[in-house]
C-alpha cells in the first residue's frame, strides 16, 4: 500500500474521509497532521485520535498550526460541524499526540518515503505552507498532493466566490498552489455533485459498531446544516471525495490549469484558473456511483466479523 500523510481539520466530512482511508487496502496512513479550520488544530487532533481508537487503528497524530499564515484562527464552524467539530457527538478519548508538529511530521515522512509518499490535504493549507517554508524542495520530493479546496468555476460556500479551506488560509493556499507540487485539486465544482442523504446516515448507524453509529449521528447533524441553507437534506462529500481520488478509486474528469488565489478584497480566497504558474489537475467530475462506493468503503471496516453480509 502507498503511504499517505493526511492533513485535516476533523470535521464531520474529515471523519468520513479518515474512515474511508483507514478501510482502503491500497493506501496506508503513515501519519496525520491537524490544522485549525472546522475546529482548532488541537481539538481536530483529539477528534482524530478518538476516531482512530473507535476504528481500532493506531496512526501517529501531530498537532499543526493553530493560526493561519495571515492572521488568527477565527473559531471554526460550529454551525456546520458542531461545537467540537464532530457534530457534538462525544467519543472516548484516544492516544496522545506525537511530540513533533504536523509540518515536522510531513518533512520526516517525505525523507523516509520520498516520492512514494502522497499527501492528502482536506483542511486549510497552513501546515503544508509551513513545511514548504522549512524545505522549499518538498514539491519535488513527494508524490501527489491531493487538495480538497477551492471553487474554480463553481460558486463558493463560505463567501459567494470562495471555498472554506482556501478562504481560511488564503495566503497558505496561494503559496502551496504556486510551489510546483504534482497537484490534484478537488474543488466544490465536483464535490457538490456527490452527496449523502438520510438513508446513508441510517445505513451507517445500522452497522452498529460504535464508530458507525457515531458517523451516522454526525451525518445527521451535517444534513441539518445543509438543509438549513439549501432546503434539501443532502450533504456534499467534500473530503471523502478527495480521499477516494487520492486512493485511486474513482474514474474522474479533470482539466489542467494554473490556479491563482485572490488575496484581499471582496473576492479574498477565490481560486481562479490562469495560464500562469504551475499546472494543477482540477477535478470537475467523478463517476455516477461515487457516493455509493464511498458509503460501502466506509462501512466495510477492518473487522469483518462485525458485519453481517450485505445483500
Ligand atoms: C471543506 O471545508 C470544511 O468545512 C470541510 O471539512 C471541507 O474540508 C469544504 O468546503
Ligand atoms: Ca475538512
Image (tube, rainbow, N blue to C red):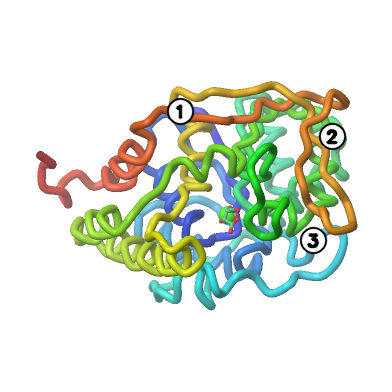
Q: Quadrant of residue 206?
A: bottom left
Q: Does residue 208 appear to the left or right of 87 in the view shown? A: left
Residues 299 and 251: in front is 251
Q: CA distance from mark 3 to mark 2?
A: 17 Å
**Residue named by callout 1:** 1
Neighbours of disc 1 within 10 Å: few (<14), some (14-19), many (20+) = few
Q: Is residue 171 above or below residue 310?
A: below
Neighbours of disc 3 within 10 Å: few (<14), some (14-19), many (20+) = many
Q: Does residue 88 appear to the left or right of 131 in the view shown? A: left
Disc 2 residue: CB within 8 Å of ligand 1: no
Picture quadrant of ligand 2: bottom right
Residue 305 pos. (x, y %): 15, 47
Q: Residue at x 82, y 37 (%)?
A: 260
Which quadrant of the rendered structure holds the N terminus?
Answer: top left
**Residue named by callout 2:** 178
Q: Tell me which label, 2 or 1, sits earlier in the chain.
A: 1
Report if the CB atoms under discs 2 and 1 are less than 8 Å apart.
Answer: no
Neighbours of disc 2 within 10 Å: few (<14), some (14-19), many (20+) = some
**Residue named by callout 3:** 68
Q: Residue at x 85, y 38 (%)?
A: 135
Amino acid at each position: 500500500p502507498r503511504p499517505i500523510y493526511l492533513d485535516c481539520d476533523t470535521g464531520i466530512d474529515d471523519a468520513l474521509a479518515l474512515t474511508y482511508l483507514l478501510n482502503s487496502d491500497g493506501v496506508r496512513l503513515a501519519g496525520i497532521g491537524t490544522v485549525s479550520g472546522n475546529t482548532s488544530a488541537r481539538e481536530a487532533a483529539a477528534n482524530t485520535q478518538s476516531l482512530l481508537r473507535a476504528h481500532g487503528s493506531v496512526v501517529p497524530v501531530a498537532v499543526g498550526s493553530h493560526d493561519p499564515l495571515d492572521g488568527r484562527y477565527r473559531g471554526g464552524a460550529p454551525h456546520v460541524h458542531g461545537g467540537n467539530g464532530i457534530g457534538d457527538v462525544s467519543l472516548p478519548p484516544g492516544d496522545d499526540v506525537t511530540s513533533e508538529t504536523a509540518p515536522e511530521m510531513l518533512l520526516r515522512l517525505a525523507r523516509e518515503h520520498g516520492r512514494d509518499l502522497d499527501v492528502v490535504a482536506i483542511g486549510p493549507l497552513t501546515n503544508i505552507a509551513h513545511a514548504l517554508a522549512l524545505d522549499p524542495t518538498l514539491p519535488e520530493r513527494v508524490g501527489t498532493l491531493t487538495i480538497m479546496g477551492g471553487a474554480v468555476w463553481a460558486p463558493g460556500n463560505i463567501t459567494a466566490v470562495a471555498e472554506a479551506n482556501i478562504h481560511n488560509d488564503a495566503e497558505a493556499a496561494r503559496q502551496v498552489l504556486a510551489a510546483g507540487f504534482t497537484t490534484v485539486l478537488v474543488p466544490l465544482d465536483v464535490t457538490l455533485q456527490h452527496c449523502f442523504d438520510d438513508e446513508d446516515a441510517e445505513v451507517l448507524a445500522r452497522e452498529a459498531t460504535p464508530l458507525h453509529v457515531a458517523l451516522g449521528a454526525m451525518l445527521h447533524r451535517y444534513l441539518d446544516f445543509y438543509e438549513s441553507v439549501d432546503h434539501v437534506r443532502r450533504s456534499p462529500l467534500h473530503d471523502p471525495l478527495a480521499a477516494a481520488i487520492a486512493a485511486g478509486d474513482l474514474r474522474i474528469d479533470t482539466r489542467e490549469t494554473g490556479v491563482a488565489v485572490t488575496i484581499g478584497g471582496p473576492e479574498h480566497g477565490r481560486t481562479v484558473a490562469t495560464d500562469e504558474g504551475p499546472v494543477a489537475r482540477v477535478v470537475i467530475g467523478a463517476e455516477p456511483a461515487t457516493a455509493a462506493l464511498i458509503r460501502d468503503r466506509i462501512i466495510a471496516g477492518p473487522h469483518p466479523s462485525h458485519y453481517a453480509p450485505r445483500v
